[in-house]
Amino acid sequence: MRGGGLYAITDSALLADGKLLPYVEAALIGGARWLQYRDKSGDSVKRLEQASQLRDLCRQYGCELIINDDLALAAELGVGLHLGQEDGSLREARQQLGPQALLGATCHASLQLAEDAIDAGADHIAFGRFYTSQTKPGGPSADLPLLRSARARFSLPIVAIGGITLDNAAPLLQAGADYLAVINGLFGAPNAETVQQRARQFSQLIHAS
């Protein structure tokens, strides 16, 4: 299940004021393969409405939707889930979502966390931050040697996250990343057309590696 591609992650601040759906659709047109819905507002009604709309968009464009830190919502919509280290049990999530659902885990800069996540049912693992991140500026840092070690050790998809832009993405791919998880480098754009252009450039870069 290696695959690979652009992993777009939403941000409620960047995609406020009606930008969520048009910007996400632009990213999907540009070739994003996975989309993570990340909203920490706690507004369950809004989250269900937005995630349902995103699921429909993802189905239209052949993209996989992954929910950040909300097992109940992922189960209700029949989509994937991403859990951080403090976000709940991967084992429980795998049991609830079934064997086919995408289930990812934040592993920061630790091969042991990745090993534990795989043992608990994760089918892809995320390392980072690799570069300075606006979303999590104080997050643990990871480096290219870690990525190379992970690639040599694990056969399932590896996600790189943290401050990734078109200018700094290539070394991550060369070191073994399959998916590039991008927030500001994709959605921090003045309009949907720019998002689509960036998504296409990321996708071309990934598939050329």
Image: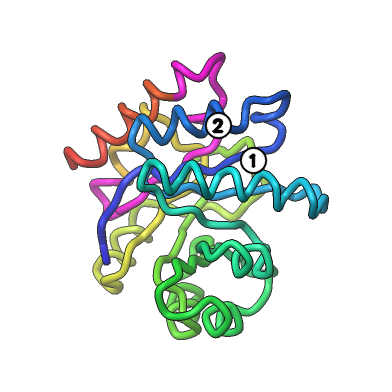
Q: Position of residue 193 (x, y in %)?
A: 45, 16
Q: Are marks 2 and 1 in contact (CB under 8 Å)?
A: yes
Query: Which of the numbered marks, if any, corresponds to residue 184?
Result: 2
Task: Specify start and end residues of the magenta stretch as a single range.
Answer: 173-195
Image quadrant holding the C terminus, namely top left
Q: Position of residue 153 (x, y in %)?
A: 28, 73
Q: Position of residue 53 (x, y in %)?
A: 59, 43
| Label 1 secondary element | loop
Q: Residue at x 71, y 32 (%)?
A: 13
**Spatial separation of the CA atoms under disc 2 and disc 1:** 8 Å
Residue that label 1 marks: 135
Query: Which of the numbered marks, if any, corresponds to residue 175?
Result: none
The reply to whether the magenta stretch includes residue 191 is: yes
Amino acid under label 1? Thr
**Nearer the N terminus, badge 2 or badge 1?**
1
Q: Quadrant of residue 30?
A: top left
Amino acid under label 2? Asn
Looking at the image, residue 54 lies above or below residue 148: above
Q: Is residue 119 left or right of residue 95?
A: left
Q: Is residue 104 left or right of residue 167?
A: right
List the single residue furthest toward the left: 208
The reply to whether the magenta stretch includes residue 171 is: no
Q: Residue at x 26, y 40 (%)?
A: 206
